[in-house]
Image (cartoon, helix red, strand yellow):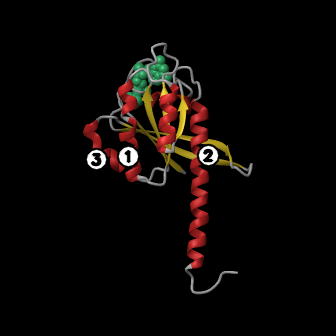
């Protein structure tokens, strides 16, 4: 069971991306997320060794309102991944990505992060792909360009993010096994 949180400014498409992924639906109507909503998704992912495994992911959809700051901090706790979404038609939402990243990484330093450039279906796009590529390199995050409206890249985003989080989780388990055996007063055969 893995926890994923959605972050980013208001109206960038966090709820829409989650809905597209979990229900394969989209609504033009804007419903402000108040507090938190949850969605559960079970999916089959392939490990790097080519093994299939079933992953259960709880997607937490947080409200973007700054008044919920303390609440958000607590909700971030324990997440193994985050999507930080911005709207390619509103540059300010892109400029805020760094702040979202800092907030999240302070709470979950070992989590996997994907920055998501959403609404790429729109003709009035202002933030170019190069800007996203820069963020990707600067922050060492995954980067995807999506449209929750058409569904473009939404599955790829979540599948790759979850696969990466599972891999990271396994690596840390391996490390903690090695760490704990090396601190034992005897050798484990
Ligand atoms: N054209 C377009 N509109 C989108 C897309 N994703 C979300 N929207 C619209 O943007 C508005 C805000 O979306 P929402 O998911 O509620 O944003 P949130 O506040 O980040 O959860 C709604 O009117 C959605 O219909 C997209 O990929 N393309
Ligand atoms: Mg929302």
Residue under the point 48% across and 26% down: 118
For mark 1, give the secondary structure.
Answer: helix
Residue located farthest toward the right when viewing the structure as drawn:
50
Question: Which residue is denoted by mark 1 in the rendering?
Answer: 102
Q: Is residue 107 visible?
A: yes
Mark 3 highlights which residue? 70
Query: Residue lying farthest left?
Result: 67
How far apart in space, not on screen, are marks 2 and 3 (Cα)?
30 Å
**Mark 1 neighbour density, 10 Å: few (under 14) some (14–19) many (20 or more):** few
Q: Is residue 157 above or below residue 188?
A: above
Q: Nearer the viewer, residue 40 or 48?
A: 48
Above or below, 148 relative to 37 = above
Q: Which mark is residue 163?
A: 2
Q: Are marks 2 and 1 in contact (CB under 8 Å)?
A: no
Residue 18 visible to the viewer: no
Q: Quadrant of residue 185?
A: bottom right
Q: Position of residue 51 (x, y in %)?
A: 73, 50
Q: Earlier in the sequence, mark 3 or mark 1?
A: 3
């Amino acid at each position: 069971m893995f926890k994923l949180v959605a972050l980013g400014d208001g109206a960038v498409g966090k709820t829409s991306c989650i809905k597209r992924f979990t229900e394969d639906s989209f609504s033009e109507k804007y419903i402000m997320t108040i507090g938190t909503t949850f969605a559960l998704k079970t999916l089959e992912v392939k490990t790097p060794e080519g093994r299939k495994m079933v992953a259960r992911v709880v997607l937490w959809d947080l409200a973007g309102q700054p008044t919920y700051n303390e609440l958000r901090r607590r909700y971030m706790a324990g997440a193994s991944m985050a999507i930080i979404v911005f709207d390619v038609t509103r540059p300010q939402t892109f400029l805020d990505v760094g702040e979202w990243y800092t907030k999240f990484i302070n709470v979950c330093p070992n989590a996997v992060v994907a920055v998501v450039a959403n609404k790429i279906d729109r003709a009035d796009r202002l933030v170019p792909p190069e800007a996203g590529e820069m963020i990707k390199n600067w922050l060492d995050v995954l980067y995807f360009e999506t449209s929750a409206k058409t569904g473009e890249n939404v599955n790829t985003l979540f599948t790759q993010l979850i696969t990466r989080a599972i891999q990271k989780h396994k690596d840390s388990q391996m490390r903690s096994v090695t760490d704990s055996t090396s601190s034992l007063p005897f050798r484990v055969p």
